[in-house]
Amino acid sequence: MSSNRVIYLTTILTICSLYAAQPIQPVFQLQFGLTELQATLFTTLIMAPLGVAPLFYGFLLEAHSVKRLVRGAILLMGVLEICFSFTDSYLMLLVIRGAQGLVIPAILTSLMSYISYTCAKENVQHGIALYIGATIMGGFLGRFLSGVCTDLFGWRFFFFVLGVLFLMIYSYLGRIQDHVKLQYATPSFNSVFSLLKQPIFFWLYLCIFCVFFVFAAFMNFLPFKLMSLHPDYGGAGIGFLYMGYSMGVIVAISNKKIRAFFGNELAATSAGLFLYLIGTAFFLVENYWVMFGGMFIFCTGMFMAHSLLSGFVNTLTHENKAIANGLYISFYYTGGTLGSFLPGIFIRDFSWTVFVYSLLFVICLSFFCCWRMKRSL
């Protein structure tokens, strides 16, 4: 297996683990007698460290081996997944998910930096787009297979399989060449602030924060909404709704053509945000099949914005790429962490409709950020 295939396979497996609990949170709610917001903590806790840790790992990558860091993280993930599958305590399950949240950014930041440093400059956008495609595939497979396996074998089975796969990929990763030459200058927080002081980076990071805030909110609360609409659908029915995720893979593969069609990254990102807005509006209709159709538009818009902006970061950055990527992931998952929890208050205290309208407002904020990016060029 080539090093590139190992990298992308590792990405898929890591994202599978990140989102495996999301579609079956209603199952955890019933088994442990939880409230809806308590059940969402299975996703919120694993995302929370992702908002801070990538920056730390960005610094770490500037001075240490990518291969050593990612292999150690993969080994730990395998052990944690197997422990998760055998745990009966709700508190311990949350602790394990939180620990995984500390490990996952080490993997994601390492892999993104590996790609950006090993690709020729003219191929960085394409390499990152393939990486985004792998994360999309992982997000779909993690949610879909978790739902199906839960209906067939119980919720523990899929997490045990993930653990075994992590241990297998650990051995494969030993074969990749650690030829990535990162800058060994001792980094400082000045490099972080210097990036954030540049308007183009500030508004780009804020834009992806808003984009993933909305995405995480829908992905986290849709399972509960679907279960209330159709209690007989089960995990497989919820998993099937994520078929719209397939559009993300198509978008990632077509990244270059999309950018060429619209002329530049920001024009294409604006088009993606428009589709995102339209797809979100579909969720105002409380019908499974309308939501199913809307998910295709919703995911197309989201992944257009995400794949273009993530590649744009690497195009803009010539030094300290690991830190720039770490900041991108930090803003991305900080938005996801807050989005996976806070909007639930609107459902609890008001209604699903108010929840959707609040997220439409956040997408409008992302349009504003994109406009400010254009003015910063």
Image: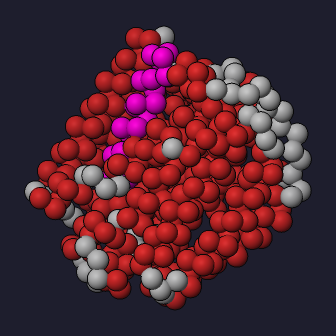
The image shows residue 338, relative to residue 314, as above or below, that is below
Total label count? Answer: 0
The image shows residue 271, relative to residue 138, as above or below, that is above
Given residues 105 and 259, the one toward you in this image is: 105
Q: Residue at x 48, y 17 (%)?
A: 197
Query: Is 336 within the magenta?
Result: no
> On the rendered structure, is 318 left or right of 311?
right
Q: Quadrant of the N terminus?
A: bottom right
> On the rendered structure, is 252 left or right of 44?
right
Give how far across and how far down residue 131 sits, in percent.
64, 45
Residue situated furthest left in the rendering: 350
Give how far across and how far down residue 154 sits, in percent.
48, 87
Query: Is 211 within the magenta?
Result: yes
Which stretch did the figure color magenta?
A: 196-219
User: Does the magenta stretch mainly form a helix, a strand or a loop?
Assistant: helix
Give how far across and how far down residue 23 sits, in percent.
40, 69
Q: Residue at x 52, y 88 (%)?
A: 153
Give how far across and how far down residue 364 sits, in percent.
27, 32
Given residues 324 and 92, the one toward you in this image is: 92
Q: Quadrant of residue 310?
A: top right
The image shows residue 67, relative to residue 155, as above or below, that is above
Q: Residue at x 45, y 23 (%)?
A: 202
Q: Residue at x 60, y 50 (%)?
A: 105
Given residues 210 and 244, the one toward you in this image is: 210
The image shows residue 117, relative to residue 333, as above or below, that is above
Q: Is residue 253 visible to us here?
A: no
Q: Quadrant of residue 167?
A: bottom right
